[in-house]
Image (cartoon, rainbow, N blue to C red):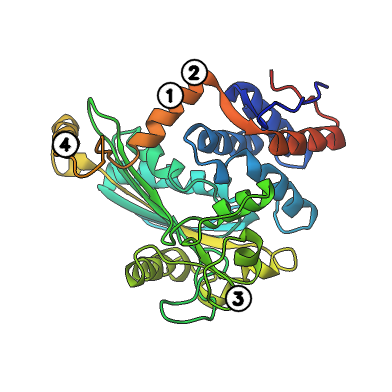
C-alpha cells in the first residue's frame, strides 16, 4: 500500500484513472456491486475534473459512513412503479442516488429519442452527486437534458426563518456542433451546501454572503451555517421561486418526500438523507435535423462570446465553458487532491484492506 506523503502546499496532483479505480475499490469493499461502485467513482471523479470539488472525492468518506449507519442501501432493488412511452416513475430503495440518477437519465434518453420528449422521476434515493453529469449524458447523444432534485431542509422560504427547502439544484445541457455543449449546473442558493462542508473539512472560512447564522446574521463559519444557520437564496426571491418549482418536479411529482417532510440536514445521522429527482430529455430532431439545431446553438454561443465586454471583464463565458476548460487542464496536469482528502482515502483503504495507489 502506497502511503500518501504530505505535499508542501497541502495539495498533490493525481491522474483520474488511479483515483477512479481507488474509489471504485472502496465502494465495492463497502458492499456495493462492482458496476455500481464504478458508476459512483466515475461521477465523483468527473466532478473533480470539472472543478466541482464539493461533489467529488471529498464525498467518499461520507457515503461510506452512510452505508455503515444504514442510511444508504448499497444493493437496492430499484423498481419501475409506473411507465408510459414517454414517462417513468422509479423507486430508489434508499440506494446510491448517483446510480439511480444514471438509470433514470438513460431511460429518459431512450424514451426521448422515440417520443420527442420524456420525463422520468426517481424517489427515495441518496445524494445524486454533481447534478450536471446527467444532462451531459443526454447532450453527448444529441438530446437536450435537464435534471433537478430536492434534498434535506436547510433553507427557509424567502422572508422566513423555518427551514423548508434544500439548495434544490438544477442543470440543463444543450448539444452543440463545433462549440462545447452549453451546460448550466447550479444550486438555487448562492452556493451548494457541499461547498460549506468542503470548507469545514479544510478548516477554512466562507464568504460572508454565502450563509446566515442561527440569528439570521451573515457568518463566515461553515459549521454554524450547516448545523444552525441557513444558506442564502441566489437572487433572493427569484432563487426561492426556482427552488419551489424544483420541489414540485423532484419531490411532489415523484411521490417522494418534499418540503419539511424531508429530514433536516441537522438530523443527518439520525434519519436517512433521502431525496427525489426529475429528469427530462428533448429530442431536437422532433423539430429539425440535429446538425441544423447544433449549428444554430453554435451561432448562439458565438453571439454571446463576441459580445463587447464591460468594465474589467476580459472574456465572456458561456455556461459550462469554464468547467470544460478546467477539465482539459486537469486531464493534462492531474486533479488537485488535498492532503486532507488523500489521508481520508488512505485511512479507508487501510480499513477495508484494499490497495491504496494514486500513482
C-alpha span from label 2 to label 4: 32 Å
- The answer to which of 343 and 74 lies nearer the viewer is 343
Q: Is residue 348 above or below residue 212?
A: above
**Residue that badge 1 annotates:** 328
178 vs 124, left or right, is left
Determine the secondary structure under disc 1: helix
Looking at the picture, how far across and down is residue 343, in whole percent? 76, 35
Marks 1 and 4, the one that precedes in the sequence: 4
- The answer to whether residue 225 is left or right of residue 297 is right
Circle 2 Cα neighbour tier, 10 Å, few/some/many (<14 / 14–19 / ≥20) = few
Instruction: Identify which residue is drawn at 26% across, 35% down.
Output: 314
Q: Are marks 2 and 1 in contact (CB under 8 Å)?
A: yes
Count residues near mark 4 (Cα–Cα under 10 Å), then give few for <14, some for 14-19, many for 20+: some
Q: Which mark is residue 293?
A: 4
Instruction: Tell me the number on the disc at residue 117.
Output: none
Residue found at x 34% / y 71%? 241
Residue 77 seen: no
Q: For the residues carrying marks 2 and 4, which lies nearer the camera in this image?
A: 2
Q: Quadrant of residue 15?
A: top right
Along the viewing direction, whichever of 118 and 182 lies nearer the viewer: 182
Q: CA distance from mark 3 to mark 4?
A: 49 Å
Q: Earlier in the sequence, mark 3 or mark 4?
A: 3
Q: Are marks 3 and 1 in contact (CB under 8 Å)?
A: no
The total number of labels drawn is: 4
| Circle 3 crowding by C-alpha within 10 Å: few under 14, some 14–19, many from 20 | some
Q: Nearer the viewer, residue 344 or 76?
A: 344
Which residue appears at 49% of the width and 60% of the height? 210
Amino acid at each position: 500500500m502506497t502511503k500518501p506523503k504530505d505535499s508542501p502546499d497541502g495539495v498533490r496532483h493525481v491522474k483520474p484513472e488511479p483515483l477512479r479505480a481507488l474509489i471504485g475499490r472502496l465502494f465495492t469493499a463497502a458492499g456495493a456491486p462492482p458496476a455500481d461502485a464504478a458508476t459512483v467513482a466515475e461521477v465523483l471523479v468527473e466532478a473533480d475534473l470539472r472543478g466541482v470539488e464539493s461533489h467529488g472525492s471529498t464525498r467518499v468518506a461520507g457515503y461510506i459512513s452512510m452505508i455503515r449507519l444504514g442510511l444508504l442501501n448499497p444493493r437496492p432493488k430499484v423498481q419501475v412503479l409506473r411507465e408510459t412511452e414517454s414517462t417513468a416513475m422509479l423507486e430508489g430503495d434508499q440506494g446510491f442516488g448517483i446510480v439511480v440518477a444514471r438509470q433514470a437519465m438513460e431511460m429518459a434518453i431512450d424514451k426521448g429519442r422515440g417520443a420527442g420528449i420524456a420525463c422520468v422521476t426517481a424517489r427515495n434515493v441518496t445524494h445524486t452527486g454533481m447534478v450536471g453529469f446527467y444532462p451531459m449524458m443526454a447532450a453527448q447523444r444529441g438530446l437536450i437534458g435537464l435534471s433537478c432534485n430536492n434534498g434535506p431542509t436547510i433553507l427557509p422560504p424567502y422572508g422566513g426563518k423555518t427551514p423548508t427547502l434544500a439548495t434544490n439544484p438544477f442543470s440543463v445541457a444543450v448539444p452543440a456542433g463545433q462549440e462545447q455543449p452549453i451546460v448550466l449546473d447550479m444550486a438555487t442558493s448562492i452556493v451548494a451546501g457541499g461547498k460549506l462542508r468542503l470548507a469545514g473539512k479544510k478548516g477554512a472560512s466562507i464568504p460572508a454572503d454565502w450563509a446566515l447564522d442561527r440569528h439570521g446574521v451573515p457568518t463566515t463559519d461553515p459549521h454554524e451555517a450547516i448545523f444552525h444557520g441557513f444558506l442564502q437564496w441566489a437572487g433572493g426571491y427569484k432563487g426561492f421561486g426556482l427552488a419551489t418549482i424544483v420541489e414540485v418536479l423532484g419531490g411532489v411529482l415523484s411521490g417522494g418526500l418534499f418540503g419539511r417532510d424531508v429530514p433536516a440536514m441537522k438530523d443527518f445521522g439520525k434519519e436517512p438523507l433521502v431525496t427525489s429527482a426529475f429528469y427530462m430529455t428533448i429530442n431536437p430532431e422532433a423539430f429539425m435535423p440535429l446538425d441544423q439545431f447544433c449549428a444554430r446553438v453554435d451561432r448562439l454561443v458565438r453571439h454571446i462570446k463576441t459580445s463587447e465586454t464591460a468594465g474589467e471583464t476580459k472574456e465572456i463565458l458561456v455556461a459550462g465553458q469554464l468547467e470544460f476548460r478546467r477539465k482539459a487542464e486537469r486531464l493534462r496536469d492531474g486533479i488537485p487532491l488535498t492532503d486532507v482528502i488523500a489521508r481520508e482515502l488512505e485511512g479507508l483503504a487501510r480499513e477495508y484492506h484494499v490497495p491504496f495507489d494514486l500513482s
